[in-house]
Amino acid sequence: MVGFLIRRIGQSIVVLFIVTIITFYMIHLFPGGAIKAMVGPKATPVQLAYYTNLYGFNRPFYVQYLKWVGQLLSGNLGFSPKLNLAVSTEIGNALPKTIVLVVLGTVVSLLFGVPLGVYQAVRRNSIGDYILTGISFLGYSAPVFFVGLILVEWFAVDTHIFPPFAPSGQTVGAILADPRALVLPVVTYAFGLYALWSRYMRSSTLDNLVQDFVRTARAKGAGERRVIWVHVFRNSLVSIVTLLGLSIPGIVAGALFTEVVFNYPGMGMAFYQAAQNVDYESLLGFTVLATVATILGNLIADVGYAVLDPRVRY
Amino acid sequence: MADTLATNAAADLGLEPSTKPRGMLVRGWEVFAENKLALGSLAFVILMLLFCFLGPVFYTTNQVNTNLLLYMCHPSGSHLLGCDDLGYDELGRLMIGGQTSLEVGLAAAGVSVLFGTLYGAISGYVGGWLDALMMRIVDAGLSIPGIMVIIILSVIFHPSPLVMIFIIAVFYWFGVARLIRGETLSLRTREYVQAVRVIGGLPMRSVVRHVVPNAIGTIIVQATFAVADSILLLSGLGFLGLGIQPPSTDWGSMLASALTYMQGGNYWWLIYPPGIAIILVCIAFNFIGDALRDAFETRLQRR
């Protein structure tokens, strides 16, 4: 176990190293280079030369890279000249709001997706199974922004049940104080994830239903309810934990579209605005942060899998 | 009864039942064809392709010049689905936009699956430190949230359909590579692959002639899902204003421009047709993918 942990963490560090090179290189692909993106298209050659020298963009790529990594390691995510704000401050403002949306949406989607997936597996090929399958295929196939806007059309514009915009409060407390405005964004965000969990739960429950331990439990006289919710369910849940860790990129993407649709001031919105302003320091900072979160998520999922499932030995 | 008749008819004609081992593709197709939902989906996809690529021949519309006299005109005999905010005929636009969506979707899936397959097969076949290095690169690619990469790339490169294909493929091939590498790891221990090595065949020959053809099931299934995902990604970028730029369009961009008018009136003909087109095409590809997975992986083994 310890050996596995060390090897796995070593891998993550290598991956992190490659990721920073890829991201840093990608940002330098901006037309005219990062400096042009920073000072704007109207800068005179003298100004360009001045800022190029000031920020060290005339140094070799590896020198710039090492300097940037050095800053990262000391916790400095960069400074956004467009917003005149440290990127870490920017993240500090936006991240808690995204976490509110992501946690609420993930919990809601799990609350529906997991039990309904089990139900579908137990009653497979029934009418209920077909209807729920149809709904989850819809969740897979409908663009997040379309779902969001249709919900706005139906529940905000036509019927005025919910407000059409997300809570716009500056703090997390202000956002949570307006739960009615949170409903549509959370539902929009949860819909795609619901499809993922319910499909997964259905197929993994189907797999587990024919396992030996289920037959043993039945032979020992366990009732159907106990067989499903204690024996099968616990085994299927292990794979959901892994899936949760692996789906962080999807979680980030879903949050981005939801935030843009509802004008919700979280990380996705900030990233989108940074992309439009060609604010490359923010883009770099956000991407690195999201990537670290993904790598950590994968690591925790792998380790969690080994801990939760006693059959897994590395 | 029908089976006996067919056998008798075959016997009358002097035909022997074929004993030639049938290829994986033929057997896969047989299982696939039993799934009515998947067959219907396939028919729908073909119908959509005909609609988008042959439709403009029969339903000619002006998709080049804007005509503000037709601003948001309601559906009528001359404009079956009305017009949009620039006076383009909506049904004609649906065909033009569909061409882009389907082209980019199919091509992006093709490019990423082709590249991912070769990469994964080489990595898995060669093994050792090269495999470790190649897979860490894939891990790295998979850890950067794809949507962020795609947004950054489409800000850097001004997106034309061709550029979009490569931007989406850059993000998508990592997953394919990892999957095919796993498949290759199990294939390379088979006798027929080892035989190539024993008689001195080059690694490339094993990969191209033996590993890839035997992983064809996984590859096709992956490609099918990739088409749906690419169409969705393209539409998402269209919504963000980073996708295909006017005067070209795709279903996502059509939807995005329609949505700006959503709260101003009931322009249902601008919102629902492209939205439903995206959803139905993606559902169809997902159904096909699921059926193919069944065909190649599970039920195939029972035969």
Image (cartoon, rainbow, N blue to C red):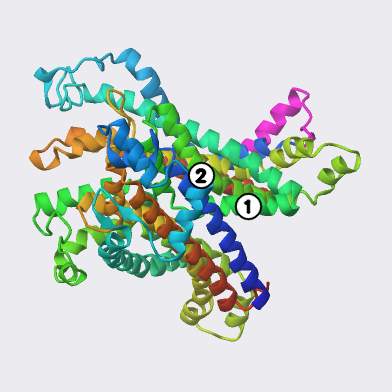
User: Eyeballing the image, is A266 above or below B157?
Assistant: below
Which residue is at a point 47% across and 55% down the rendered structure image?
A67
Which residue is depicted at the point 47% across and 49% down?
A64
Looking at the rendered structure, the kind of residue marked 2 is Phe
Would residue A10 be counted in the magenta stretch? no
The residue sitting at 80% across, 49% down in the picture is: B190
Graded by Cα atoms within 10 Å as few (under 14), some (14 to 19) or many (20 or more), the crowding at tag 2 reads some
Subunit of label 1: B
**A27 or B118, nearer to the observer:** A27
Query: Which of B271 and A78 lies nearest the eye of the viewer?
Result: A78
Q: Which of B220 and A98 is in front in this view?
A: A98
Which quadrant of the structure image shows residue A311? Answer: bottom right
Residue B42 percent across, percent down from the top left: 47, 35
Q: Which residue is drawn at 41% across and 58% down?
A: A290
Q: Distance between the residues labelled 2 and 1?
A: 25 Å
Vertical side of B160 occupied by B271: above or below: below
Residue A314 appears in which quarter of the rendering?
Answer: bottom right
Q: Which of A89 and B154 is in front in this view?
A: A89
Q: What element carries label 1?
A: helix
Instruction: Look at mark 1 in the image and give the residue it sits on.
Output: B135
Instruction: Identify the residue position indicated by label 2 in the image.
Output: A61
For residue A114, side relative to residue A61 (left or right): left
Q: Is residue A135 above or below residue B285?
A: below
A313 over B167 or under it: above or below = below
Residue B18 is covered by the magenta coloring = yes
Expressed as whole percent of the image width and height from the top left, the position of residue A165 reads: 15, 55
Q: Quadrant of the N terminus of chain B?
A: top right
On screen, residue A194 versus residue A246, left or right, reads left
Q: What range of the chain is rendered magenta? A: B1-21
Q: Dot 1 surroundings within 10 Å: few (below 14), some, or many (20 or more)? A: many
Q: Where does residue A233 sit, x and y in percent of width and height?
A: 49, 74
Q: In which quarter of the image is residue B32?
A: top right
